[in-house]
């Protein structure tokens, strides 16, 4: 039989391009934190579950309050489901320096009652107390008013000044 035997075969190791490429590594992108006292409509819309209507409501609530002192306050926005708030709250941060304050020694009943945490009855009692006892020397004095318990005081103190 006629055949040729090849005794030494030179084998070259070829590397494919696939072997030289680094494996795809998904970079974990850290979500951008939003300062809730400076954010605009577009910033809130960028959050999951927040559309134009909810964004406008959050901004309206912030404006009425005079700013947020806590991320948790965003969750008080009318129409914002708690499930949505729980998803976004990790992406929210607050700068308390941007809060608009009301001077309790000069504010009228009408000015006080415009604040969402101060109803007309509370505004009336604050002004009456001030008229009877003179100017407040500290915000802590507000606790002497029957309608202001510790919970109410903690909510409103961030928005009041002397």
Image: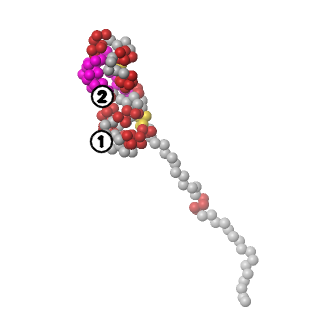
Can residue 9 be seen here? yes
| Of the image marks 2 and 1, the number of the one nearer the N terminus | 1
Q: Which mark is residue 148?
A: none
In the rendered image, is residue 162 in sight? Answer: no
Picture layout, residue 2 above or below residue 140: below
| Residues in magenta, as a range | 98-126
How crowded pointer 1 is (Cα within 10 Å; few <14, some 14-19, many 20+) is rated as: few
- Name the residue beneath numbered marker 1: 53
Q: Is residue 110 left or right of residue 150?
A: left
Residue 155 or residue 104, whichever sits in front:
155
Which residue is under mark 2?
Answer: 116
Q: Residue furthest bottom?
A: 1
Q: Position of residue 65 (x, y in %)?
A: 32, 29
Tell me: residue 157, above or below residue 4: above
Q: Which of the 4 image quadrants contains residue 137?
A: top left
Q: Residue at x 26, y 22 (%)?
A: 121
Colour mode of the rendering: secondary structure
Residue 46, picture quadrant: top left
Label 2 element class: loop
Q: CA distance from mark 2 to mark 1?
A: 20 Å
């Amino acid at each position: 039989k006629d055949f040729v035997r090849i005794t030494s075969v030179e084998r070259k190791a070829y590397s494919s391009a696939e072997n030289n490429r680094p494996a795809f590594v998904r970079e974990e992108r850290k979500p951008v934190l939003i300062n809730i006292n400076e954010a605009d409509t577009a910033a809130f819309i960028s959050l999951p579950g927040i559309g134009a209507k909810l964004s406008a409501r959050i901004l309206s609530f912030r404006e009425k309050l005079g700013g947020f002192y806590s991320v948790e306050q965003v969750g008080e926005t009318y129409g914002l489901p708690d499930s949505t708030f729980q998803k976004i709250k990790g992406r929210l941060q607050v700068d308390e320096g941007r809060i608009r304050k009301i001077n309790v020694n000069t504010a009228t009943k009408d000015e006080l009652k415009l604040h969402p945490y101060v109803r007309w009855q509370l505004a009336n009692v604050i002004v009456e107390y001030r008229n009877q006892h003179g100017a407040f020397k500290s915000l802590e004095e507000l606790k002497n008013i029957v309608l202001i318990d510790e919970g109410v005081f903690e909510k409103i103190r961030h928005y009041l000044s002397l």
